[in-house]
Amino acid sequence: MSAKSHTYQNHGITLVIGSTGKTGTRIVQRLQARNIKTRAVSRSTTPSFDWHAPSTWQAVLEDVSAIYISYSPDLAIPGATGIIHDFVEMAVAAGVQRLVLLSGRGEEEAQACERIVQQTDVEWTIVRASWFMQNFSEGEFLNMVLSGTIALPTLALDIPEPFIDVNDIADVAVAALTEYGHAFETYEVTGPRLLTFSELASEISQAAGREVQFVQIPKATFAKGVTDSGMPNDIAWLLNYLFETVLDGRNAYLTDGVYRALGREPRDFTSYAREVAVTGIWKIPA
């Protein structure tokens, strides 16, 4: 329990959308550890949930009182705003009392989705997150780390980012779902330190015990590499969007969202890197 509030008496089910994602997996684990009735959904669950199939929405909303909303792959994707609007409208009509939305910093489309949630007549909390540390151990850039070269567009060269541990995001989201005192709050969450991608590569190198370098490449080369890798079109679009738009310095500052929500400081990248290194994820495959 955070230092901010007491446990909220939730007599319904807490729905976790995106339950197989980086944040959703951790949120489900935390809710279940508290013996909170939880419905974890994705396209592969029963009942299934698909953002692009509204016919799947009603079934997962039955007896639900609180929802964690994580839109995949990102709220910046074209069309997300309309989908979020329709889902939130259905959720409120179904009797949901509390909404917690995972959002992104510096994304105009994401902020439009935030406003949709904020304009409802139910309790809401926005968790507006910086870049995930776990992108380099569980996500899109793990293979780059394994190859020894994090190759990203030139725009990212000297722009620092306050990378956030997804465990901190999960803790904030669970507090918002289960405690009093978080309603109508926008928690902009960052890590405790700004890091450039060069500095991040150095941190990973020290933790992994081998050299991982950051190399700047032209945007066109990066875009072609993403496409050639066979990534889904929406992921390819998103990565190009993030490097062309969001990593322009607009997010190069720290916030106190984790502290305001939890009464503690967020975890530093050094601690994250050391923990990941111990698991062996960053070892070069034989």
Image (cartoon, rainbow, N blue to C red):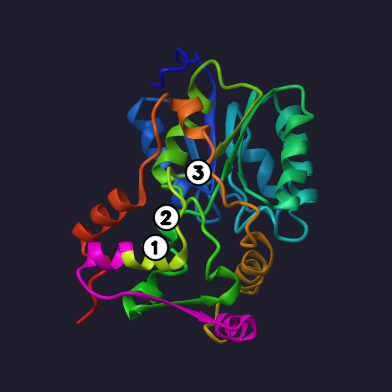
Q: Amino acid at mark 1?
A: Leu
Q: Quadrant of the C terminus?
A: bottom left
Name the residue tied to disc 1. 200
**In the rendered image of this protein, does residue 218 appear above or below residue 13?**
below
Which comes sooner in the sequence, label 1 or label 2?
A: 2
Q: Which residues are the magenta region?
A: 203-227
Name the residue tied to disc 2. 133
**Residue beneath the point at 62% across and 68% down:** 243
Give yes or no for residue 208 being in the magenta stretch: yes
Point out residue 129 in the picture as x, y percentages from the top left corner: 55, 45
Name the residue tied to disc 3. 190
Q: Helix, strand, or loop for circle 2?
A: helix
Label 1 neighbour load within 10 Å: few <14, some 14-19, many 20+:
many
Q: Amino acid at mark 2?
A: Met
Point out residue 177 in the picture as x, y percentages from the top left corner: 52, 27
274 relative position to 250: left or right: left
